[in-house]
Image (cartoon, rainbow, N blue to C red):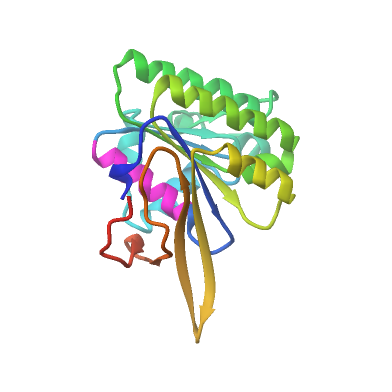
Amino acid sequence: MDKGLPDKTAIILHGGAGTGVRVFGQQFLYSGLQMGAHGIYFTAERSGEEITENMKFYKWNVEEYVKKRQLIFIDAYTTKYEKSYSADLEILKELVWDVGASNQLRMTLTKYLDKFASEHVTQIRVVIDSLSALMRTENPEDVIDLFEIIQITARKYGGIYFFVLDRGVHEERLVNTLLYLADGIFDFSTRERGSELEHTMRIQKLRNMIFSTKLIPYMIGEEGLVVETTERII
């Protein structure tokens, strides 16, 4: 499915707890790395090392990509909550200092995109995890401005950018503003069906693309998020 996503696109992954929005973003990133793309993962709620370990559960071993700088972690969590780090883990993160997570994300993201451009990298995948974490700790209006800045950055440097947005934790007006600005919206939901949980995804918006508007059932298993349909989605 991700092969059909247009370049220079900012897409919001919108879903509640347990829907697998982060699994989807990480899976998208890993599949790109396997195909030669370069990746950037911004994390504000967990350390880069923890995300690396969690991805191993799905057999997505990204350490080799980190070592050769094909994957960059921008780690806004470690300095804020752990206050210290080991020098031998420096390669795993670009730490956020007193300038704040939003400002550091903007500056560091541009720094690495410039580097990729100088190396003639043509495929870029970025995951911002998450808009919700930034909105809980900083002025939400500033986070909306940051989203627009990164969207402009995407137009300049190219790439596909996924932004995680948790459902049910923010003021409706702020959420609707972000959804309005986004180039695409992938909505994830979970509901009870008998004694089991049923996961469904729907593409609500994707600019300049023809896409299916149907609910897409999926499962979360050892291989990550598996779509349960043979229909073409985009």
Give the main secondary structure of the magenta stretch: helix
Is 171 in front, or is 164?
171
Q: Is residue 44 visible?
A: no
Residue at image location 49% in from the left, 38% down from the top: 183
Left-right relation of 107 to 37: right
Left-right relation of 214 to 17: left
Q: Residue 226 location in percent, x, y?
A: 34, 62
Within the magenta stretch, is there residue 32?
yes
User: Looking at the picture, does residue 115 appear above or below residue 163?
Assistant: above
The number of numbered discs placed on residues in the rendered structure image is 0
Residue at image location 42% in from the left, 46% down from the top: 52
Is 142 in front, or is 55?
142
Left-right relation of 39 to 191: left
Residue 229 occupies which quadrant of the picture? bottom left
User: Looking at the picture, does residue 117 appear above or below residue 83?
Assistant: above
Q: Residue 102 location in percent, x, y?
A: 64, 30
> In the image, which residues are magenta?
22-35
Is 120 in front, or is 180?
180
Q: Residue 83 location in percent, x, y?
A: 66, 35
Residue 33 occupies which quadrant of the picture? top left
User: Looking at the picture, does residue 90 appear above or below residue 48?
Assistant: above
Within the magenta stretch, is there residue 100?
no
Left-right relation of 11 to 95: left
Q: Residue 180 location in percent, x, y?
A: 60, 41
Residue at the outermost top position: 118
Q: Is residue 231 visible?
A: yes
